[in-house]
Amino acid sequence: MQRDDGGIDHGVPSPSRGGRPPSAETRAKISASLRGKTFSEAHRAHLSESAQKRPSRQHTEETRDTLRKAATGRRLSFETKRKLSEIKKGKPGHPQTVEAREKISDAKRNQTAETREKIRQSLLGRRRKFETIVKVVEARKGRKLTLQERAELKERVTKRRAKERAGAIDTMLWEYAVKHGLLSCVVQTYRITAEEILLLRSYYQHPGTERRPADDLLDRFSVALANVA
């Protein structure tokens, strides 16, 4: 695309249009991919020199203070988070999304420590209804979900709960075997090696963090426990 000054616009964002200007090397890669060729070292040096002449963006004292607070782990206000997000994306957020997230942020920020603890205790061991999950997702998005989005969300929730049920059953089997001293019988009598027992122990003692053993091993372990119990 031809610019007003006679140059060629390669689609690289500029500070005047919002967004952070890329480095000289990045601009060279973008232009080279668009032109189908690489730049010479002389041209790269020219780009680097022109980039150094451009005045750097100076942070205000307010921005520095905000960054310091973020670095120390202090909670930022919704307005500050919104501004930082817009600076990072180079464009303002959607009004409905901003409004919905602001309401959620205000509600959380105004909660006392006692209220947060009550909510945490009430949610322990409690499974939310699917409609509640839908409402939470819609509040985050700031709009109603389409039928297709609801169906996809339903599928994800169903798969996650099935995995949680399977993990809970596996953990119960392991605790039963440990409690009744059945692990040595399983190793001696059935096709389960000591290395596989170590893998099972790592999986059951750290659910969600260790990779799930193969289904064949889990099935053999269940059958072995059923026979020796």
Image (cartoon, rainbow, N blue to C red):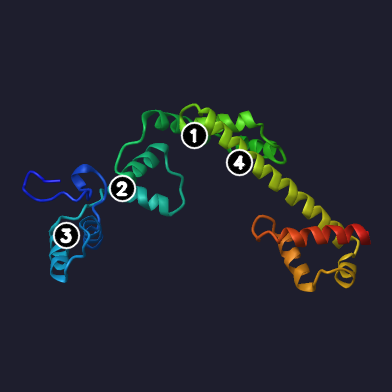
Three-letter amino acid code of the residue under disc 2: Thr
Q: Looking at the image, is 221 positioned above or below residue 42?
A: above
Mark 4: give few (<14), some (14-19) or many (20+) Cα within 10 Å: few
Quarter of the rendering containing residue 117: top right
Secondary structure of the residue carrying tag 3 is: helix
Q: Give the residue pinned by disc 2.
A: 63
Q: CA distance from mark 2 to mark 4?
A: 40 Å
Q: Which mark is residue 156?
A: 4
Q: CA distance from mark 4 to mark 3?
A: 47 Å
Q: Is residue 74 left or right of residue 9?
A: right
Point out the frontmost of discs 2 and 1.
1
Three-letter amino acid code of the residue under disc 3: Ala
Q: Give the residue pinned by disc 1.
A: 140
Earlier along the polypeptide chain: callout 1 or callout 3?
A: 3
Earlier along the polypeptide chain: callout 2 or callout 3?
A: 3
Q: CA distance from mark 1 to mark 3?
A: 40 Å
